[in-house]
């Protein structure tokens, strides 16, 4: 009978009484303690319930060493974080922040702007979210020039923490249980001492190494210098141009930058409008020309009326302001050669929820 008992499940040997009778040394089974949960939460920033479950799973795996339990649980939380991020990714994230980062090191200058989205404005105000946006912006600042998609940004690595953007996003999603998406970025850099890079954040909510808000812009102004040209004056003008970009929302740099298909589409609308108004054919071309001029003034940066008008002065276009700025600051010529403007959520469509269907689906689970 005793022999039969020995062949049964090894779980029977967990009995202290049986251990004492057989002369077997008794080992206590580790427990999920408050101290362990607190340690794991400090390592992962995850909810207490998830930490408790991960620790319990580690113990079920037969681990007894406290450090091994924590290591296993931490890895499990990371795996869960990837799953959580994948599940949350389908939810609409239209809140968030735009961030700019401009660095000048002698003649070498770098300017970056990024958009990171969250589902709610509450999360966008969270310090952990701000830390993520800072990490993303640093990674973009050391990445390639030009525009990057969100997927391309996620492959970059933060030079300070050596953490990939993708890992940082996954970890935060696991912690706060909300969809977070890196949507896009743009970087401009120059090695010329005759260029000025400026960034601007409208209604900044975070300032410091990286500035953050709902609208951000970058501009590049190239200078054909003369001896003794006023660097500070050109930098001040560059800052105003970045502010103008944020306020006036230009779509194109100048008339030449407007794609042919965009211009043709606009002009076909003008022709149809003029015909609908009963205008004779001989005047339609003149109407199209006038409305095209207004189109440029609305959407082409250099053609737009400069938002900083001097009191009593005649309204000037941005191109005219650059000519005047060159004279005022001792330069042969000032040229606006690049700009970027980001606004949180622009171009995205919010998901429209069918409230009746949502209630019906919830009732099915009851």
Image (cartoon, grey):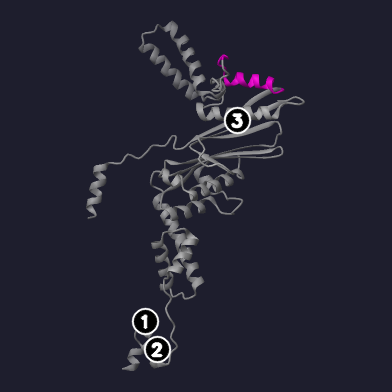
Quadrant position of the C terminus in the picture: bottom left
- Residue 34 is marked as none
Tell me if residue 29 comes above or below residue 38 in the rendering: below
Q: Which residues are magenta?
A: 312-330
Q: Position of residue 143 (x, y in %)?
A: 60, 44
Label 3, secondary structure: give it: helix
In depth, the one of 252 and 66 nearer the eye is 66
Tell me, for residue 11, which label it has, or none: 1
Residue closest to the eye, 318 or 204: 204
**Residue 145 coordinates in the image, percent (x, y):** 60, 39
Residue 239 - label: 3
Q: CA distance from mark 3 to mark 1?
A: 73 Å
- Which class describes the residues within 10 Å of circle 3: few (<14), some (14-19), or many (20+)? many
For the residues bearing labels 3 and 1, Cβ distance under 8 angstroms: no
- The local crowd at label 2, few if under 14, some if 14 to 19, many if 20 or more residues have their Cα within 10 Å, is some
| Residue 316 on the magenta segment | yes
In the image, residue 239 lies in the stretch drawn in magenta = no
Quick one: SS at disc 1?
Answer: helix
* Percent of width and height locating residue 14: 38, 83
Q: Earlier in the sequence, mark 3 or mark 1?
A: 1
Q: Which of the two labelled residues, at mark 2 and mark 3, occupies the earlier sequence position?
A: 2
Q: Mark 2 near mark 3, Cβ–Cβ under 8 Å? A: no
How many numbered marks does the figure carry? Answer: 3
Question: Given the current orientation, which residue lies at the most extreme right position?
Answer: 227
């Amino acid at each position: 009978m005793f022999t039969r008992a020995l062949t049964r499940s090894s779980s029977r040997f967990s009995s202290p009484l049986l251990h004492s009778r057989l002369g077997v040394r008794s080992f206590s089974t580790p427990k999920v303690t408050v101290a362990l949960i607190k340690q794991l939460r400090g390592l992962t920033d995850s909810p207490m319930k998830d930490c408790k479950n991960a620790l319990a799973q580690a113990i079920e795996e037969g681990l007894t060493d406290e450090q091994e339990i924590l290591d296993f649980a931490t890895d499990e939380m990371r795996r869960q974080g990837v799953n959580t991020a994948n599940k949350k990714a389908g939810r609409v994230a239209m809140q968030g922040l735009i961030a700019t980062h401009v660095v000048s090191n002698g003649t070498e200058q770098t300017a970056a702007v990024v958009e990171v989205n969250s589902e709610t404005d509450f999360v966008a105000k969270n310090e952990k979210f701000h830390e993520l946006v800072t990490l993303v912006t640093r990674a973009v600042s050391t990445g390639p020039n030009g525009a990057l998609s969100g997927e391309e940004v996620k492959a970059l690595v933060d030079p300070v923490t050596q953490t990939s953007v993708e890992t940082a996003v996954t970890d935060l999603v696991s912690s706060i249980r909300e969809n977070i998406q890196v949507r896009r970025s743009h970087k401009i850099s120059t090695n010329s001492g005759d260029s000025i890079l400026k960034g601007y954040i409208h209604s900044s909510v975070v300032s410091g190494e990286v500035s953050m808000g709902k609208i951000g812009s970058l501009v590049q102004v190239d200078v054909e210098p003369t001896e003794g040209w006023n660097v500070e004056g050109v930098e001040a003008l560059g800052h105003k141009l970045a502010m103008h970009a944020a306020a006036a929302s230009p779509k194109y740099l100048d008339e030449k930058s407007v794609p042919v298909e965009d211009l043709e589409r606009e002009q076909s609308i003008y022709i149809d409008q003029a015909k609908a108004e009963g205008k004779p054919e001989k005047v339609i071309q003149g109407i199209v020309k006038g409305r095209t001029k207004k189109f440029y003034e609305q959407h082409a940066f250099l053609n737009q009326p400069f938002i900083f008008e001097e009191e009593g002065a005649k309204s000037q276009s941005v191109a005219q302001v650059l000519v005047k700025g060159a004279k005022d600051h001792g330069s042969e010529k000032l040229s606006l050669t690049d700009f970027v403007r980001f606004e949180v959520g622009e171009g995205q469509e919010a998901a429209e929820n069918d409230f009746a269907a949502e209630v019906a689906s919830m009732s099915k689970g009851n």
